[in-house]
Image (cartoon, rainbow, N blue to C red):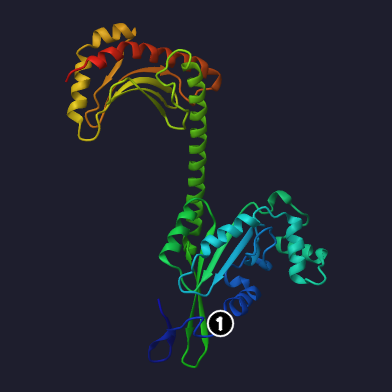
């Protein structure tokens, strides 16, 4: 996208240039100018420190450490290059390092930034409080998040792909492009644009981010519950059957065990409100005919199998899939109250023992 000079007769494109061609240095010039007018990047920022590096065992420094109006820390990383280099990786490290900063440390940092030789913490604190509009220190509101602003002449596709991935995972990171132009009279213009996320999409991105964060949280809770569910079930199962004795609890919705024949598994499955034990039959992709033949051979013995098992079973050939199952459903799943789990586990393990007894020899004798 070009910038045009408008005169009475025509639009004339203003020539792009580079920071290097104009002799604009990264720290000496660009960082100094942005430090003095940080609103160019975001109107709600206050510069806390420049070249901040108060951490152990690291010589790395944040170009500009800022505070936003919501009391969040903001790491500003600058590059005058045309691709941004690996600035997103650097900024992530810095954000992680600074995220544990306390309000008192912030005040001390800002005091030394204002006057390194004679820091005045009272004046620094007053300045920060005025910016935030606080009449007292609200520790619980300070540094709830650490934001990142990447500012460069341009960004590579690799960098922007990484940034979009981070945004989708709830990281507040932005790319601001600063592109210099030279007028015919030698005047240098700087076009500053937030390109990721687009300003008009920021609110929408925030809503999407909140939704995704909730989804991730729900997924984590689900996985934790299933892991605990399987841990408790395996404790019950080990005293009654060795089918799953070599299995470790996982966060998956199933636990499979062998029955001494390829293509057949005795499997525990748990869902939100019910669970089941099953003989799963699958000979792999492209082997649907063999799987169907094995299922039909067992189905021909349905009455005898159910008599040995002691209850009716569900026979599902699943013609659209790569497998078939024969299962028994138990009331109660991983979302059931934990106090009900022992009863559910006892019912599942007992059903698995009976299913193994009804199926093992018949599976071994199948010819199809």
Q: Residues within 10 Å of mark 1 (few under 14, many from 20)?
A: few
| Position above or below: 83 against 57 | below
Q: Could you tell me residue 96's position as x and y percent?
A: 61, 55
Using residue 133 as the reference point, say whether residue 284 is left or right of it.
left
Q: Nearer the viewer, residue 315 or 245?
A: 245
Using residue 215 as the reference point, say whether residue 51 is left or right of it.
right
Q: Nearer the viewer, residue 120 or 289?
A: 289
| Position above or below: 197 against 3 | above
Say which quadrant the C terminus sits in.
top left
Label 1 sits on a secondary structure element that is loop
Using residue 2 as the reference point, say whether residue 281 is left or right of it.
left
| Position above or below: 186 against 272 | below
Q: Please say whether residue 265 is visible from this viewpoint.
A: yes
Q: Could you tell me residue 185's position as x and y percent?
A: 49, 93
Residue at screen point 48% across, 42% down: 215
Instruction: State the image quarter where residue 283 is shown.
Output: top left
Residue located beneath label 1 in the image:
24
Q: Please say whether residue 134 is visible from this viewpoint.
A: no
Q: Could you tell me residue 295's position as x and y percent?
A: 22, 21
């Amino acid at each position: 996208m070009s910038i045009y000079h408008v005169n009475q007769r025509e639009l004339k494109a203003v020539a792009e240039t580079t920071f290097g061609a104009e002799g604009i240095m990264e720290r000496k010039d660009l960082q100094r100018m942005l430090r003095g007018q940080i609103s160019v990047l975001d109107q709600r920022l206050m510069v806390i420190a420049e070249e901040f590096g108060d951490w152990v065992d690291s010589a790395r420094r944040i170009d500009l450490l800022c505070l936003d109006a919501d009391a969040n820390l903001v790491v500003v990383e600058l590059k005058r290059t045309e691709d941004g280099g690996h600035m997103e990786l650097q900024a992530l490290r810095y954000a992680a390092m600074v995220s544990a900063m306390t309000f008192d440390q912030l005040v001390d940092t800002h005091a030394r930034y204002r006057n390194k030789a004679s820091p005045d913490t009272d004046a620094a604190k007053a300045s920060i409080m005025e910016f935030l509009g606080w009449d007292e220190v609200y520790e619980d509101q300070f540094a709830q998040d650490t934001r990142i602003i990447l500012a460069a002449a341009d960004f590579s596709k690799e960098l922007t792909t990484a940034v979009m991935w981070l945004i989708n995972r709830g990281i507040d990171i932005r790319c601001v492009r600063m592109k210099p132009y030279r007028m015919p009279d030698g005047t240098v213009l700087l076009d500053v644009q937030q390109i990721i996320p687009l300003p008009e999409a920021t609110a929408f991105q925030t809503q999407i981010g909140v939704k995704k964060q909730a989804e991730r949280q729900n997924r984590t809770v689900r996985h934790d519950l299933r892991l605990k569910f399987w841990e408790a079930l395996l404790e019950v199962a080990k005293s009654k059957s060795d089918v799953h004795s070599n299995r470790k609890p996982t966060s998956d919705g199933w636990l499979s065990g062998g029955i001494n024949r390829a293509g057949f598994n005795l499997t525990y499955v748990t869902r939100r409100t019910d669970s089941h034990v099953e003989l799963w039959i699958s000979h792999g992709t492209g082997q649907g005919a063999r799987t169907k033949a094995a299922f039909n051979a067992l189905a021909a013995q349905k009455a005898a199998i159910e008599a040995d098992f002691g209850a009716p079973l569900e026979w599902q050939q699943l013609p659209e899939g790569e497998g078939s199952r024969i299962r028994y459903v138990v009331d109660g799943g991983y979302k059931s109250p934990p106090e009900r789990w022992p009863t559910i586990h006892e019912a599942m393990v007992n059903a698995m023992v009976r299913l193994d007894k009804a199926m093992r020899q018949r599976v071994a004798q199948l010819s199809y």
